[in-house]
Image (cartoon, rainbow, N blue to C red):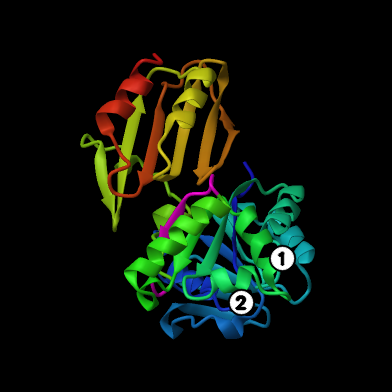
């Protein structure tokens, strides 16, 4: 299974690098390869740095930062031979880049694109969207997003923030939107690590200011029923991940990834007839978006 890829984009000054700072310091046990434009923009805690060699910084928590000085394709080609060293790849797109195009480049190297997260500045994004010189770039970025992070919400009045969110609904109506300040985004939202401990008896958990629901079953799911379940999830659900057994293909486990509006379902590994059936699924959303009884009914009715 190739390393999953997440791209973080957004116009200059939106807060992408601050999001990466939090991710590096709160990696939730994941070994992340972070590809950035310039190390100088990232304030890495000195206590996290294990070693530094030119364009690569190895961190004590298993993460690695690589600059893109030699080009994205060169770094991706190198990572393709180190898949066993990491759990996830995160690319910070430059402030004027099309993050979806970068995601497609990564996919061409065999790294499945999990999602494109675009960070926007709550104070300036509307003005930027109509600017003669940068408006087209900002709009491309908004439309490429699977998930929007409205950063610096503390710098605008509540009424202005609500007006901005309404504008985003009109501008990119199918894209889930979260608000934050200081670039803080829960790792579970960006990367959604899935562990056995998250399939606990209590189906509703908490990830900071979000809610989560976990589901586990020994009965294989039908692909059509899974698709119907994902389609029916409310807009407040921003992330889902699962390791699934499908009745349509009993020879493989499948990895489900969902970020905002993007869903992928890829073979994870082959299984033998003696392996027990074990489907695990975690769904994360904003408060009020998780209905554990309804979700259980939807999936329970599939079996």
Q: Are marks 2 and 1 in contact (CB under 8 Å)?
A: no
| Residue highlighted by disc 1 | 136
Residue, x 45% and y 21% (percent of image)? 275
In this rendered view, identify the residue nearer to me: 44 or 117.
117
296 versus 5 height, above or below:
above
Q: Which badge, 2 or 1, is on the more N-terminal residue?
A: 2
Residue, x 40% and y 75% (percent of image)? 182
| Residue highlighted by disc 2 | 12
Describe residue 161's horizontal placement relative to residue 37 as left or right: left
Q: Quadrant of residue 48?
A: bottom left
Magenta residue span: 173-182
Residue 100, how many percent across, how many down? Answer: 68, 55
Secondary structure under tag 2 reads loop
Q: Residues within 10 Å of mark 2 (few under 14, many from 20)?
A: some
Q: Can residue 276 be seen by looking at this rendering?
A: yes
In this rendered view, identify the residue nearer to me: 148 or 271.
148
130 versus 213 height, above or below:
below
Q: Main secondary structure of the magenta part?
A: loop
């Amino acid at each position: 299974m190739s390393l999953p890829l997440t791209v973080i984009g957004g116009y200059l000054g939106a807060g992408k690098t601050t999001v990466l700072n939090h991710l590096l310091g709160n990696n939730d046990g994941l070994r992340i390869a972070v590809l950035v434009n310039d190390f100088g923009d990232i304030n890495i805690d000195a206590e996290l740095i294990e070693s530094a060699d030119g364009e690569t910084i190895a961190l004590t928590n298993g993460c690695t930062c690589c600059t893109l000085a030699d080009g994205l394709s060169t770094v991706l080609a190198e990572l393709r031979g180190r898949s066993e060293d990491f759990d996830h790849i995160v690319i910070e797109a430059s402030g004027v880049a099309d993050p979806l195009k970068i995601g497609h480049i990564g996919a061409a190297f065999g790294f499945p694109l999990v999602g494109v997260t675009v960070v926007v500045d709550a104070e300036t994004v509307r003005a930027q969207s109509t600017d003669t010189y940068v408006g087209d770039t900002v709009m491309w970025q908004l439309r490429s997003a699977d998930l929007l992070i409205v950063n610096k919400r503390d710098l605008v009045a509540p009424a202005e923030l609500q007006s901005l969110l309404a504008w985003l609904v009109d501008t990119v109506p199918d894209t889930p939107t979260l608000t934050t300040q200081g670039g803080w985004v829960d790792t579970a939202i960006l990367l959604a690590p899935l562990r056995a401990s998250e399939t606990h008896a209590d189906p509703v958990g908490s990830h900071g200011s979000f809610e989560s629901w976990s589901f586990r079953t020994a009965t294989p799911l039908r692909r059509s029923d899974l698709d119907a379940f994902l389609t029916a999830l409310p807009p407040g659900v921003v992330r889902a991940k699962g390791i699934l057994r499908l009745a349509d293909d009993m020879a493989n486990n499948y990895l489900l990834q969902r970020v905002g509006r993007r869903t992928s379902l890829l073979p994870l590994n082959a299984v033998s007839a003696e392996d027990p059936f074990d489907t695990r699924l975690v769904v994360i959303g904003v408060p009020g978006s998780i209905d554990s009884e309804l979700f259980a009914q939807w999936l329970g009715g599939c079996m």
